[in-house]
Amino acid sequence: MRISAKRMQAKNHSSKLRLPNGRSLEIGSAPEHLPCIMGIVNITKDSFFEGSRRLEPKAAIETALDMIRQGASIIDFGAESTRPGSKEIDPKEELSRILPVLEGFRAVSDAVISVDTRHPKVAEAALAAGADIINDIEALQRPGMAEVVARGRAAAILMHMQGTPQNMQQNPSYENCLEEVRSFLEGAADYAIEAGISPDAIILDPGIGFGKLKEHNIAVLQGIERIASLGFPVLIGLSRKRLIGELTGKDVADRLAGSLGAALAAWLNGAQILRVHDVAETLDALRAFHEVIQ
């Protein structure tokens, strides 16, 4: 199998993500030029994948530490499910779930913490508790969110979503999905920069499964380089999602192999960060793949 020079260049691109308190994270760095792995820890009982749920702070912290030992560069803690059909929860409830985990994890680890939230009050408290990145499915569009991130000098993940989690899979429609997603993310990045967020603290996420059908998701995955051409690292989160079930015919518990295959394709197409449930398995697949194709 031969890989085009263009794809090899994208795969081997390295960049530095600016984090709070003078810290930074190398993305796609030597010697392996592998993508950064973001491990998912869900502190909610209604996450779509049961295996990712850690309702007790101790269990969530232990899982996160295991992921770091396995090679994750970032831990993404989330306390609100945004799966298709889910309803928004009160920020107070979200905080009651996530703050004990953030405080406990930060007390024993200096690893990079991402918090998956769309609520400015939650983001502000999370940053005060030691979070480095706000991972926002609404791309900082909610009033006050961009200002919270800017004040905290945090990094931000800006995601595309058509609709809301409650209705996003009810007949999503595009004329050209890839270009519409790219245009939205370009505007979201401009908005974030105007709000005072450093360009080198921005990550783009095209939102696999968020208001997209199978054909839309595939178009986005095939066009990652087009999104990366905006000049920001691209994160892809497809681990065990409905798309993998549509491609393999497997239930969520049996989608590991399909997720690994899609993750390799995403990396080959230019993704620099992979958000996954299965850290060790993903890194094994990436390392083996890299050794064979280089």
Image (cartoon, helix red, strand yellow):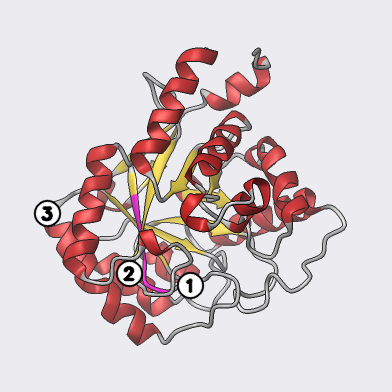
Residue 4: x %, y % from top left: 68, 16
Residue that lies at the very extreme toward the left in this rendered image: 108
Q: Which is nearer the N-term, disc 1 or disc 3?
A: 3
Q: Amino acid at mark 2?
A: Ile
| Residue located 53% across and 43% down the image | 259
Numbered circle sitting on residue 108: 3
Q: Which residues are magenta?
A: 75-80
| Mark 3, secondary structure of its residue | helix
Q: Amino acid at mark 1?
A: Arg
| Mark 2, secondary structure of its residue | loop
Q: Image quadrant of residue 121?
A: bottom left
Question: What residue sits right under mark 2 in the picture?
Answer: 43
Residue 30: x %, y % from top left: 38, 21
| Residue located 36% across and 18% down the image | 31
Q: Is residue 264 visible?
A: yes
Please tell me how crowded label 3 is: few (under 14), some (14-19), or many (20+) other residues with Cα within 10 Å.
few
- Distance (Cα) linking label 1 and label 3: 26 Å
Residue 182: x %, y % from top left: 71, 50
In-image side of 247 versus 293 (left or right): right
| Residue located 60% across and 74% down the image | 165
In-image side of 161 versus 58 (left or right): right
Question: What residue sits right under mark 1 in the picture?
Answer: 118
- Could you say which is closer to the camera, residue 145 or residue 47? 47
Q: Image quadrant of residue 271?
A: top right
| Mark 1, secondary structure of its residue | loop
Q: Nearer the viewer, mark 3 or mark 2?
A: 2
Instruction: Say which quadrant the N terminus sits in.
Output: top right
| Residue located 53% across and 67% down the image | 140
Q: Which is nearer the N-term, disc 2 or disc 1?
A: 2
